[in-house]
Amino acid sequence: MNSNFSLFERFLARGLGHFPFLKRITKAVYSRVIYLLYMSSKCSSSLGPACQVLNDDLENFFGYYDKSPVNSIGSVICCRSPYDTRQIPSKNQLIFLSVYLENEIAPCLNIPLNAYNWQQGARAQWISNDNFIFNKYDDIDNRYIAIVYSVKTGSEVKRFELPVQDAFRSDYFLSINYSRVMSVRPDYGYRNLEGLASEQLHNLEDDGIWRVDYDTGRIKLIKTLESICQIKKQKLFPECFHEINHIMISPNGQSAIFIHRYYYKKRRFDRLFLLDVKSEKLKLLADNEMVSHCCWVDTKTIFGYLRGPGGLDGYWLIDCVTGEFKRFLNHFLDRFGDGHPHCCGNKFVTDSYPDKSRMQHLFLGNLKTGEVTELGRYKHGFDFSGECRCDLHPRLSPDGKRVYFDSVFSGKRQLYYQDISG
């Protein structure tokens, strides 16, 4: 039996989006009932072996799909948790950010983390082959900050007064208000500070996107939420809660995309923006209610799963200069719905959410030829749910020869890789 959700089922789910609470309850019940018909005894199957990155008793994972855990010399960074990751993260429980050199089985660095979530970790990312940046809660100044560590020295080399969302090498990084994120979407927030009160959430003048210069630490609020809302402003905006998330800087560092999300009576709406980092000008790329996951293909092209022209949900290529939308050549992926794409040249990887048999699918594709290959299927149990879910979040290595992904098919959260060089 075909275990993918049908177009009719996806249409119903889309309609239930107008009623978030009802959708959540319906989805929870329906997925369990349908699983009884489609359940499989297999926990995984793949074209090649799924290799554990770490031989570790602790649960481990990397984070989001937009960054690779490995740098160009083979060093791997990952989060390790001594606690059950089926439980909501606690500000009182430290996990670790560990660095492994190529072919080494013991970490060369083990840094305590006190600000993290299961979806994005601490936003750890390489800014060079030696240095990496990540977020931390400063309990003395009572705020979130960004820390830079050096692998060579094994120590902190810089710290900044704001947390990182995305960094461009050692030039600059962009920051957002994680307390606001925690208030409206705790999957991507941190619990060290209280969320914002309603009055604070409606203050859009002093919140938005900050640019932080790496050398000087100079901070500038380059776009306020208020200025973002002025673009194609809607009448319901004053009644909504707003947030910015999923900032991704272009390969040349000149631009960034981000999602403006606003919530009206708990229903979510999305808009995709392009930001020129130097001129600080904004361009609205997509405004059709749903933008899910995107990535940069090159300095002018976006690839992502979103609602395109004609209200059609699927994988689209967006030309940032002309604003033109093009459907991805191969519609094979449409039957699997939403995914998390990551590109390296014309090569990309993406995944699916659990199907009726609770299997997550991992795909390798080519943007130029339209070819798509299924690399594997991995089981996702019901005990990892809500913000404790484990999406595969596939990421390609810088040389495009490996795909790294998180999975719970073994019963615990772990970071894996699969060789795709052949």
Image (cartoon, rainbow, N blue to C red):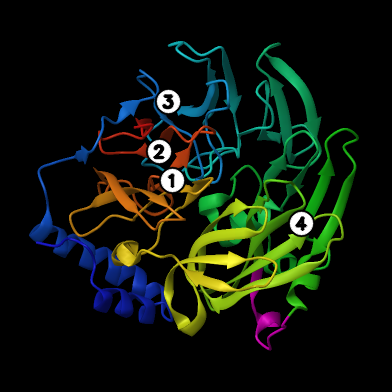
1 and 2 marks in contact (CB < 8 Å): yes
Residue wearing tag 4 = 209
- For the residue marked with disc 2, what is the amino acid? Phe
Report how far apart the C-alphas of labels 3 and 1 lie in the structure. Answer: 21 Å
Disc 3, disc 4: CB below 8 Å? Answer: no
Look at the numbered disc 3 and give the secondary structure of its residue: loop
Q: Earlier in the sequence, mark 2 or mark 4?
A: 4
User: Residue beneath label 2, please?
Assistant: 405
Q: Measuring from the top left, give residue 254's x and y in whole percent.
A: 77, 51
Q: Which residue is mark 1?
A: 393
Front-most of residues 196 and 389: 389
Q: Position of residue 153 (x, y in %)?
A: 71, 11
Amino acid type indicated by mark 1: His
Q: Amino acid at mark 4?
A: Ile
Marks 3 and 2 sit apart, C-alpha to C-alpha, by 20 Å
Element carrying mark 4: strand
